[in-house]
Image (cartoon, rainbow, N blue to C red):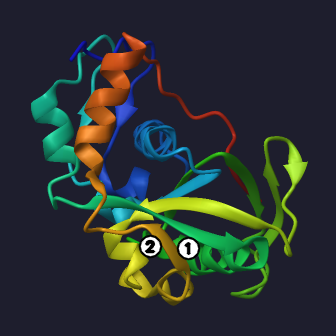
Amino acid sequence: MREIDQCLDIDSRRATVRSGEAAIGNLIADAMRNATGADVAITNGGGIRGDTKYPRGAKLTRKDILTELPFGNKTVTIAMIGADIIEALEHGFAQAETISPRFPQVSGLSVTVDLDKATGHRVTSVTIDGAPLDPAEEYVLATNDFLARGGDGYDVLADGEQQISAADGTLMASQVIDYIAAKGSVTPKVEGRIVME
């Protein structure tokens, strides 16, 4: 595996991955989506456990990735309508002020969240590939097998129709390693996927 070419600091500390968009969360979610061909990906910040701020110019190795993703989670895909994806995001942001492990790291979508609104009404917009998410349209979501079982309270994911199950899925860590190897180098960064107002 070639190492990550870093232009910016990559921060996997607990407060970072559980309270806002994080470069390492983007990298992991992108790898999951790329490996499965899903439309979007959601993983929980609480599953990222390295608790490290890698200095500028540092190289992320296989060992680092396995430290960041220590639980052996696999990536599954679920067919879901847009309204259910919104419900999952609402759940993810319900405790955003408390550094909650359920905080979502995402790929394939951009979401705006108003933290002044009541829980369940915080997501004000979601776009996929620049177009508004259609609540009635079916999308394929990549997520980890823990969330797919309803872990961290993501019950809506447990109700979805799995296309790739945990039994058939691949380790998230392996997908990240393969993603970096295929790209040659990557420069993950915070890019406005999650905007909290």
Image quadrant of residue 59? top left
Q: Nearer the viewer, residue 178 or 52?
A: 178
Q: Amino acid at mark 2?
A: Arg
**Kind of element beneath mark 2:** loop
The residue drawn where x is 52% and y is 62% is: 104
Q: Amino acid at mark 1?
A: Gly
Inter-mark Cα distance, 2 to 1: 5 Å
Which residue corresponds to mark 1? 92
Residue 101's place in the image compared with 140, above or below, is below
Tag count: 2
Q: Nearer the viewer, residue 25 or 94?
A: 25
The residue drawn where x is 77% and y is 71% is: 82
| Residue 118 screen position, x and y as percent | 75, 87
- Residue 19 can be seen, yes or no: no
| Quarter occupied by the C terminus | bottom right
The residue drawn where x is 25% and y is 68% is: 167
Query: Is 80 on the left-hand or right-hand side of 178?
Result: right
Residue 17's place in the image compared with 144, above or below, is above
Decide: marks 2, 1 in contact (CB < 8 A)?
yes
Query: Is 174 on the left-hand or right-hand side of 132?
Result: left
| Residue 33 screen position, x and y as percent | 51, 45
2 or 1: tag closer to the N-terminus: 1
Question: What is the number of the mark on residue 154?
Answer: none
The residue drawn where x is 44% and y is 73% is: 102
| Residue 151 screen position, x and y as percent | 36, 82
| Quarter occupied by the N terminus | top left
| Residue 68 screen position, x and y as percent | 22, 46
Query: Is 93 on the left-hand or right-hand side of 69?
Result: right
Residue 90's place in the image compared with 23, above or below, is below
Which residue corresponds to mark 2? 102
- Residue 16 can be seen, yes or no: yes
